[in-house]
């Protein structure tokens, strides 16, 4: 009965490859997010989707492309991986109509680029 | 623009000591929401507490307590009688209450080490 689940938990790959991270939430929330946590633990928003519509698109290289097939899923595809992409990526969800409610986070995907 | 400052990068305490983690925020909104999250060594982000800008009541939950003061734009977190299991990185976060505002702005986190 995991609320927000991400796969894979670990991703080790070589520079130049293309990879995807999947996220699913079973909380019935209408908004989903991708955050990046760097090596210094700083958490920064990358993207947000509300009802499958992109609403936040921070300054992120266009090698990163989010896709939301439905309200319960938000996947992150990364092309031409670079060393600087190594980080932990967190998916989160919340109910936008209840803005005071916390965002619920997945366990993170640790991406390591060799 | 919103900003959250956690000035303490790392804190070490001996078990059973009390410890306070500071959080100072900046926002122009009159309605906003403050959160604390815990990130233990296992890496997940665990929600601890939420506070609305119009509710300045302090809150206590077991050994945890939170002191929200609008006058100083602070939302500090105190752990009483700390335990080794409290060792983690703690994040303070802010969300605007305005329409169309979705993201959380996080502080840089405070790493707490509780030494047995």
Image: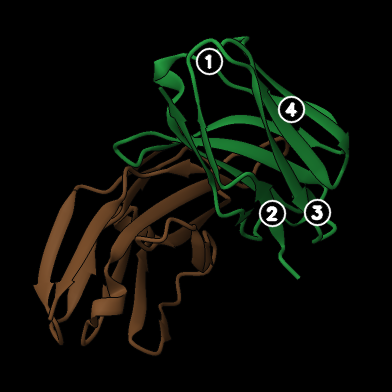
Chain colours: A green, B brown
Q: Chain of mark 3?
A: A
Mark 1 or 3, which is nearer the eye?
Answer: 1
Label 2: how many Cα within 10 Å (few below 14, some 14–19, many 20+): many
Q: Earlier in the sequence, mark 4 or mark 3?
A: 3
Q: Earlier in the sequence, mark 1 or mark 2?
A: 2
Mark 4 or 1, which is nearer the eye?
Answer: 1
Residue B87 appears anywhere in the view: yes
Do circles 1 and 3 both sit on a common chain?
yes
- Quarter placement of the C terminus of chain A: top left
User: Which residue is under mark 2?
Assistant: A5
| Vertical side of A88 occupied by B8: above or below | below
For the residues labelled 4 and 1, the Cα–Cα distance comes to 24 Å
Do circles 4 and 3 both sit on a common chain?
yes
Horizontal placement of B40 versus B55: left or right?
left
User: Which residue is under mark 4?
Assistant: A55
For the residues labelled 1 and 2, the Cα–Cα distance comes to 23 Å
Q: Earlier in the sequence, mark 1 or mark 3?
A: 3
For the residues labelled 2 and 3, the Cα–Cα distance comes to 13 Å
x, y (%) of residue A35?
A: 55, 37
Q: Residue at x 79, y 27 (%)?
A: A67
| Vertical side of B83 occupied by A24: above or below | above
Q: Chain of mark 2?
A: A
User: Which residue is under mark 3?
Assistant: A29
Disc 4 + disc 1, Cβ < 8 Å: no
Q: Residue at x 24, y 56 (%)?
A: B111
Q: Residue at x 27, y 49 (%)?
A: B6
Mark 2 or 4, which is nearer the eye?
Answer: 2
Residues B77 and B14: in front is: B14
x, y (%) of residue B7?
A: 20, 47
Residue B102 appears anywhere in the view: no
Q: Earlier in the sequence, mark 4 or mark 1?
A: 4
């Amino acid at each position: 009965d995991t609320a927000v689940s991400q796969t894979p938990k670990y991703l080790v790959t070589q520079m130049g490859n293309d990879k995807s991270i999947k996220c699913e939430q079973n909380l019935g929330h209408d908004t989903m997010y991708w955050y990046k946590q760097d090596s210094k633990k700083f958490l920064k928003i990358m993207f947000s989707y509300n009802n499958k519509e992109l609403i936040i698109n921070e300054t992120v290289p266009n090698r990163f492309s989010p896709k939301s097939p439905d309200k319960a899923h938000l996947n992150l595809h990364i092309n031409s991986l670079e060393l600087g992409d190594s980080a932990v990526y967190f998916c989160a969800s919340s109910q936008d109509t209840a803005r005071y409610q916390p965002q619920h986070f997945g366990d993170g995907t640790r991406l390591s680029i060799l | 623009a919103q900003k959250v400052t956690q000035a303490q990068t790392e804190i070490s305490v001996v078990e059973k000591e009390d410890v306070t983690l500071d959080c100072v925020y900046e926002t122009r909104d009159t309605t906003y929401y403050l959160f604390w999250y815990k990130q233990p060594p296992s890496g997940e982000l665990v929600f601890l507490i939420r506070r609305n800008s119009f509710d300045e009541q302090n809150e206590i939950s077991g050994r945890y307590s939170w002191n929200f003061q609008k006058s100083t734009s602070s939302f500090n977190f105190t752990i009483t009688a700390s335990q080794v299991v409290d060792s983690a990185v703690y994040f303070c976060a802010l969300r605007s209450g305005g329409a169309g505002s979705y993201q959380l702005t996080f502080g840089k986190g405070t790493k707490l080490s509780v030494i047995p």
